[in-house]
């Protein structure tokens, strides 16, 4: 693995995204804005969301590894971008929870 630290942070952010999304849906009556994720939640419950999220984790890691073997700097840039992008919905969701509980 070329970027194990990036991947650990990416997996953490993805897991937190699942937890925050579930909290918003289950405890606050929110809804999923991603139509694909919403469809999977309706069909399979939270397990649909888990499957989608970790499928995307595998895909992103594979893309970073393939790109990193061709161009190490570009692979690192992709891995960093993946962490930042995965963390954004977590931050937004936590701000929503904070606003609803105040």
Image (spheres, grey):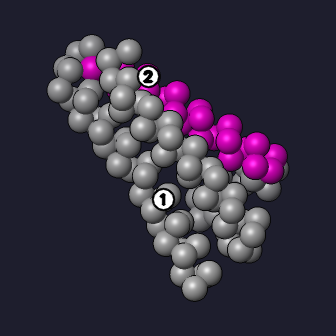
Residue 63, labelled with which disc? Answer: none
Instruction: Residue under label 2, please give it.
Output: 62
Instruction: In this rendered view, identify the residue nearer to me: 56 or 92.
Output: 92
Whether 46 is among the magenta residues is yes
**What residue occupies the far bottom of the structure in this picture?**
102
Q: Secondary structure at mark 2?
A: helix
Instruction: In this rendered view, identify the residue nearer to me: 18 or 31.
Output: 18
Residue that appears at 54% across and 76% down: 98
Q: Quadrant of residue 24?
A: bottom right
Neighbor class of circle 2 (other Cα within 10 Å; few <14, some 14-19, many 20+) is few
The vertical placement of 94 against 69, above or below, is: below
Instruction: In this rendered view, identify the residue nearer to me: 23 or 76.
Output: 23
Instruction: Residue under label 1, please give it.
Output: 89
The segment highlighted magenta reads 44-68
For the C terminus, the quadrant is bottom right
Where residue 99 sits in the image (x, y, percent)?
54, 81
Alpha carbon separation for disc pair 1 and 2: 22 Å
Q: Quadrant of residue 66?
A: top left
Residue that appears at 64% across and 63% down: 32
The vertical placement of 28 against 41, above or below, is: below
Q: Is residue 68 visible?
A: yes
Residue that appears at 27% across and 14% down: 69
């Amino acid at each position: 693995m070329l970027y194990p630290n990036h991947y650990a942070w990416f997996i953490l952010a993805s897991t937190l995204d699942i937890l925050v999304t579930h909290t918003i849906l289950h405890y606050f009556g929110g809804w999923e804005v991603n139509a694909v994720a919403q469809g999977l939640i309706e069909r399979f419950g939270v397990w649909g969301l888990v499957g989608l999220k970790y499928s995307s984790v595998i895909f992103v890691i594979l893309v970073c590894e393939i790109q990193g073997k061709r161009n190490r700097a570009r692979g690192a840039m992709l891995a960093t971008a993946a962490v930042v992008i995965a963390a954004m919905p977590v931050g937004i969701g936590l701000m929503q929870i904070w606003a609803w509980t105040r």
